Image (cartoon, rainbow, N blue to C red):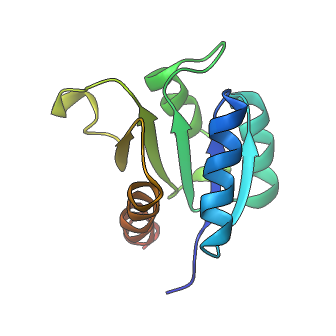
């Protein structure tokens, strides 16, 4: 299975750089954005298969950001994984393709991308 293209969205530049480095060193093509507006532009240009979305973003936050991304045609079939320090009830994240708890270690982030990529392949069929 080919490595998916991943879009990382996080307004914390340290976290953004770290996630991009971890995924890039594992062979993923990674694009990064600091907000949903920039992410939508990158999605239209690169059509990622997986989106890692920080829960706390400026302007559009968390689950509202998920809705904005789900309505973008360029992300049709893409897996969306929420990255958060918050604990969610199962029903709150049922519409997500996964979530990663902060602070994460590289193996957790990579495993979440791999799991969600399998989901995105199934969504595209």
| Number of marks in the rendered image | 0
**Residue at the limit of the structure toward the top, as seen here:** 59
Given residues 54 and 40, the one toward you in this image is: 54
Q: Residue at x 53, y 20 (%)?
A: 56
Rendered view: 58 above or below 78? above
Q: Position of residue 82 (x, y in %)?
A: 44, 38
Q: Residue at x 71, y 28 (%)?
A: 35
Rendered view: 105 above or below 33? below
In this rendering, would 72 be left or right of 108?
right
Q: Position of residue 62 (x, y in %)?
A: 48, 23
For the question of whether residue 24 can be seen, the reply is yes
Q: In what quadrant of the picture does the C terminus appear?
A: bottom left
Q: Residue at x 77, y 59 (%)?
A: 46
**Residue at the limit of the structure toward the left, as seen here:** 90
Q: Position of residue 98 (x, y in %)?
A: 34, 48
**Residue at the limit of the structure toward the bottom, as seen here:** 1
């Amino acid at each position: 299975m080919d490595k998916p293209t991943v879009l990382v969205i996080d307004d914390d530049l340290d976290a953004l750089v770290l996630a991009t480095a971890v995924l890039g060193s594992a062979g993923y093509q990674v694009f990064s954005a600091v907000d949903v507006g920039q992410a939508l532009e990158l999605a239209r240009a690169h059509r990622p298969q997986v989106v890692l979305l920080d829960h706390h973003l400026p302007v559009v936050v968390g689950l509202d950001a998920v809705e904005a991304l789900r309505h973008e045609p360029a992300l049709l079939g893409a897996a969306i994984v929420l990255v958060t320090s918050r604990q969610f009830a199962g029903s709150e994240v049922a519409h997500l393709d996964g979530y990663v708890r902060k602070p994460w270690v590289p193996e957790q982030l990579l495993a979440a991308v791999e799991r969600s990529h399998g989901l995105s392949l199934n969504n595209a069929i």
